[in-house]
């Protein structure tokens, strides 16, 4: 496979890439912010308040701290190995065990495609609500809209990384505006004397748990809103200067989103009693917040359109991540080599894009059909929680991988995390994987996770046989 690379900006110490290096520091920051924001805070604020009471900001703050600690490990690894594939690549270099690498890659891919597929279903629902089409959840029109939406995402992805990240910029600005609107409504309510900040220091547990376990449960739930920063490392081969840009942009992106989440949580509880925030019959938590602070603002009519942009951004970024993950692993010899092919004109991994899109279309069909029933709607919700559970497991492995790779010396300057950080990251992420960080209703996440990993084992056997049927490929990707 050959392609021209005359206009590719080489990175000092990097071997180069067939992909198009089009992402500068500003685009990288917006990519990270857009990926973390997603729709998590819109959906989770009320749920987190239901777990811990008025101090709903505490789990978001704790989730931000845990995510930042792990981000330090990602920063050292991505600047040390500025190649696509992220967590799977670092696992591959640290342990060199094909099975472990494949399972990590499969887990991350599942998290991305599951998130994108759920987002496609949500997009169709928001479109129906915003335009007052009246389509019911699980109906054929919703399915067709969701499938068409995913096809559009694939087209943007194939068109080029420049087009993809510019689309991300627009979508990020819209979803960011929705959250800033809520914060400004809160500030306005304070000036009118409508806010009760005494509620924001009240911890309450529905199951009479200790304060530490209560915050742990809330943090595990809120962590879903903080994931996304790790997706950016899969775009390392399309960044102009990953060694220089990643440390500042990732930490800045985490700080911006963490601050927004904490402010939104404080605003929500100060304006609306916790009992109302957790009552689905009264509407989404943040819609109630705007109604309480600015009753004349028709946020219930605006929200579906903001939601459309937010889930579209989530789907785009996750499909970008999934395709680059497969591309990177194919180049490492872990996955079949055809997945590493790059289009000579568009310079995008078109085979991986097509492969992940086909999987997403199948999963969308399942998600949409399931969302039409009461039990199915619960399954869709559990998929989101399972995504956070699996990624916490991956983060544990990444922190351990950094500890192992500290002895590997490379001939390029790179970020170095404080020595203690990966140890703290591994312990905190492993702790949040445990059952003590989940409610009884969330225990089914472990069953879904086990099924997914079991499927991964089956696919590993098939892939292992396929990659070794022809020429033998070792763990460095060399024949």
Image (tube, rainbow, N blue to C red):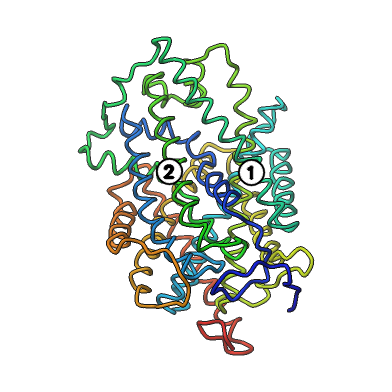
- Discs 1, 2 touching: Cβ within 8 Å: no
Residue 64 quadrant: top left
Q: CA gap, disc 1 to disc 2?
A: 18 Å
In-front residue for pair 391/240: 240
Image quarter where the N terminus lies is bottom right
Residue 15 quadrant: bottom right
- Residue 241 % position (x, y): 57, 62
Image quarter where the C terminus lies is bottom right
Residue bearing the label numbered 1 = 169
**Mark 1 surroundings: few (<14), some (14-19) or many (≥20) residues within 10 A:** many
Left or right: 202 in relation to 123: left
Which of marks 2 and 1 precedes in the sequence?
1
The residue drawn where x is 58% and y is 40% is: 371
SS of the residue under disc 1: helix
Q: Is residue 46 above or below residue 157?
A: above
Left or right: 478 in relation to 412: right
In-front residue for pair 80/214: 80
Residue 363 visible at all: yes
Outermost residue to the left? 210
Q: Is residue 97 above or below residue 229?
A: below
Total numbered labels placed on residues in the image: 2
Residue bearing the label numbered 2 = 255
- Residue 362 % position (x, y): 65, 55
Q: Is residue 291 above or below residue 151?
A: above
Q: Is residue 103 above or below residue 125?
A: below
Left or right: 460 in relation to 425: right
Outermost residue to the right? 345
Residue 462 visible at all: no
Left or right: 405 in relation to 297: left
- Residue 224 % position (x, y): 44, 45
The residue drawn where x is 69% and y is 68% is: 8
């Amino acid at each position: 496979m050959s392609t021209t690379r005359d206009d590719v900006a080489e990175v000092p110490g990097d071997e180069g890439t067939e992909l198009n290096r089009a992402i500068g520091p500003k685009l990288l920051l917006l990519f990270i912010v857009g990926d973390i924001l997603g729709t998590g805070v819109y959906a989770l604020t009320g749920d987190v308040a239901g777990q811990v009471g008025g101090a709903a900001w505490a789990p978001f703050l704790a989730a931000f701290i845990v995510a930042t600690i792990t981000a330090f490990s990602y920063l050292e690894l991505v600047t040390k190995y500025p190649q696509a594939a992220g967590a799977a690549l670092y696992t591959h270099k640290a342990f060199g065990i094909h099975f472990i690498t494949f399972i990590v890659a499969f887990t991350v891919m599942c998290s991305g495609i599951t998130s994108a597929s759920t987002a496609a279903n949500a997009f169709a629902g928001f479109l129906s609500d915003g335009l007052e089409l009246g389509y019911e959840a699980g109906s054929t029109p919703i399915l067709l809209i969701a499938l068409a939406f995913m096809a559009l995402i694939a087209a943007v992805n194939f068109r080029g990384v420049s087009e993809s990240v510019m689309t991300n910029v627009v979508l990020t600005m819209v979803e960011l505006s929705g959250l800033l609107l809520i914060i400004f409504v809160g500030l306005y309510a304070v000036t009118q004397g409508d806010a009760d900040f005494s509620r924001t220091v009240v911890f309450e547990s529905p199951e009479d748990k200790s304060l530490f376990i209560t915050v742990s449960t809330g943090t595990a739930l809120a962590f879903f809103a903080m994931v996304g920063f790790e997706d950016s490392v899969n775009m390392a081969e399309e960044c102009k200067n990953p060694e220089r840009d990643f440390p500042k942009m990732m930490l800045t992106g985490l700080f911006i989103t963490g601050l927004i989440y904490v402010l939104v949580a404080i605003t929500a509880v100060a304006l609306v009693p916790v009992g109302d925030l957790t009552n689905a019959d009264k509407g989404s938590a943040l819609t109630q917040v705007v109604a309480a602070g600015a009753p004349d603002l028709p946020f219930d009519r605006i929200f579906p359109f903001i939601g459309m942009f937010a889930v579209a951004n989530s789907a785009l970024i996750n499909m970008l991540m999934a395709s680059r993950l497969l591309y990177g692993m194919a180049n490492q010899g872990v996955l079949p080599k055809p997945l590493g092919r790059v289009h000579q004109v568009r310079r995008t991994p078109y085979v991986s894009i097509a492969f992940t899109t086909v999987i997403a279309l199948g999963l969308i069909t399942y998600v949409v059909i399931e969302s039409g029933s009461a039990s199915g709607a619960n399954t869709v919700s559990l998929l989101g929680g399972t995504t956070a559970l699996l990624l916490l497991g991956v983060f544990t492995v990444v922190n351990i991988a950094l500890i192992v790779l500290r002895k590997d010396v490379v001939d390029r300057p790179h970020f170095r995390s404080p020595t203690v950080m990966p140890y703290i990251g591994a312990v905190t992420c492993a702790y949040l994987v445990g059952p003590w960080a989940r409610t009884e209703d969330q225990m089914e996440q472990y069953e879904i996770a086990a099924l997914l990993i079991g499927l991964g084992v089956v696919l590993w056997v098939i892939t292992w046989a396929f990659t070794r049927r022809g020429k033998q490929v070792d763990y460095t990707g060399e024949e």
